[in-house]
Image (spheres, helix red, strand yellow):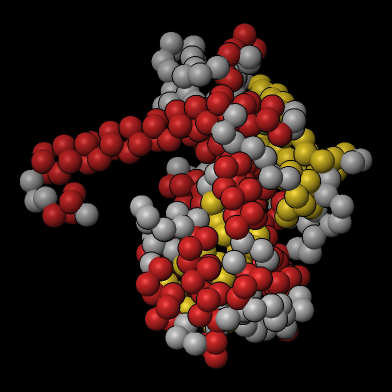
Amino acid sequence: MLTRKVADPATAAAVANQREALESISELLNALLDISRLESGAIRPDISDCSVQAIFRRLKAAFELQAKAKGLELEVEDCDDAVHTDGGLLEQIIQNLVANAIRYTREGSVKLRCLHEQAFIRIEILDTGIGIPRDQMESIFEDFYQVRQDDGQRREGLGLGLSIVRRLGRLLEHPIEVHSDPGRGSCFAVTVPRGQASLASTSTRLKSLSMEPRHGLILVIDDEPAVADATQMMLELEGYEVLVAAKIGDVRRLIPDASAAPDVIVSDFHLSRDTTGIDAVRMAREAAQRTIPAIVVTGDTSSHMAVVRSQLPSCHVMSKPIDVDALLDRIQALLRAEPDAAELESAV
């Protein structure tokens, strides 16, 4: 925004450079935070069956414009299988590999696909990029390492993406492989256990949704306006009615009595310095005079899961980043369940 308001070309260029530097610093800090959390054991996998197609769809949407800007074709094949893993952490692995592939590919394409290997799914990221010399094949997974080419120049990037990929692969016990032909391209692969059942493809799922509209009133509680707006839009597109509370005081206003009670609550864990999702869910249940099923979203399931479960019955914990399909499936499952007619005393 600031760049567009500066008329002088030299000043505009300086502002653009400063913004780029700040973005690089932000990227570096986020990467270092990820590594610190991995090294300290703060990240604990939440394993379940998840849709590969849902991950592929999100990554295509995230990277398509970036690939086009470089004149690259981003090919994403359909993959209707389920895998048994932590969906959020697997998505971070694939995201880092796709970002790396686009960064180091000057022309041609980047492809995302999955192959079947008995009880496993092999997810591959292929590119027509600069490739990796054989003597640097192991070094690329080291912190801050950047591939050197014949001209002696290092390429752009922080040199932390692959380091995080390897750490996440070890945490999830998913082997990470790389094959490369310098000057012709590379193939990175992560092998993941197959889920118990194949999940429907995106097109099948969307067709099913259009034939069976969702019904129900969902209360979304989140103090981040952008997150609340995006969640509301997503749920309304699915056919739900949505109420949004930015703070705990809004909950009482939106639920003045039991007749206005929502069917399901979706709340962030951290709402403000003094309140949490636990407080918000409790207040909603007080107003409704029944145990409304709830989903609490948190970025630190290891410390919050036990707290939520011990203090809130009929409450499910989901970890960030949220798998949208998993969230929708959870909401639908809660709506299909028999309503809990328990009074307030059994709810809190």
Quick one: quadrant of the N terminus? bottom left
Quick one: quadrant of the C terminus? bottom right
Residue lying furthest left: 8
Residue lying furthest top: 135
Query: Could you tell me residue 19's position as x and y percent?
Result: 25, 40
Residue lying furthest front: 345
Q: Judge by depth and name the residue closer to the eye, 308 or 38.
A: 308
Q: Judge by depth and name the residue closer to the eye, 89 or 142.
A: 89
State left or right for residue 273 relative to residue 39.
left
Query: Could you tell me residue 288's position as x and y percent?
Result: 55, 81
On screen, residue 64 above or below 342: above
Can residue 109 be seen here?
no
Q: Residue at x 55, y 56 (%)?
A: 297
Place residue 347 in its image quadrant: bottom right
Query: Could you tell me residue 341's position as x and y percent?
Result: 70, 81
Q: Residue at x 63, y 26 (%)?
A: 166
On screen, residue 144 above or below 329: above
State left or right for residue 288 relative to residue 207.
left
State left or right for residue 341 relative to residue 68.
right
On screen, residue 329 above or below 252: above
Q: Judge by depth and name the residue closer to the eye, 282 or 103.
A: 282
On screen, residue 26 above or below 220: above
Can residue 6 be seen here?
yes
State left or right for residue 341 relative to residue 31.
right
Q: Residue at x 39, y 74 (%)?
A: 250
Q: Residue at x 57, y 33 (%)?
A: 42
Residue lying furthest bottom: 259
Q: Judge by depth and name the residue closer to the eye, 298 or 205.
A: 298
Number of residue marks: 0
Query: Could you tell me residue 257's position as x and y percent?
Result: 49, 87
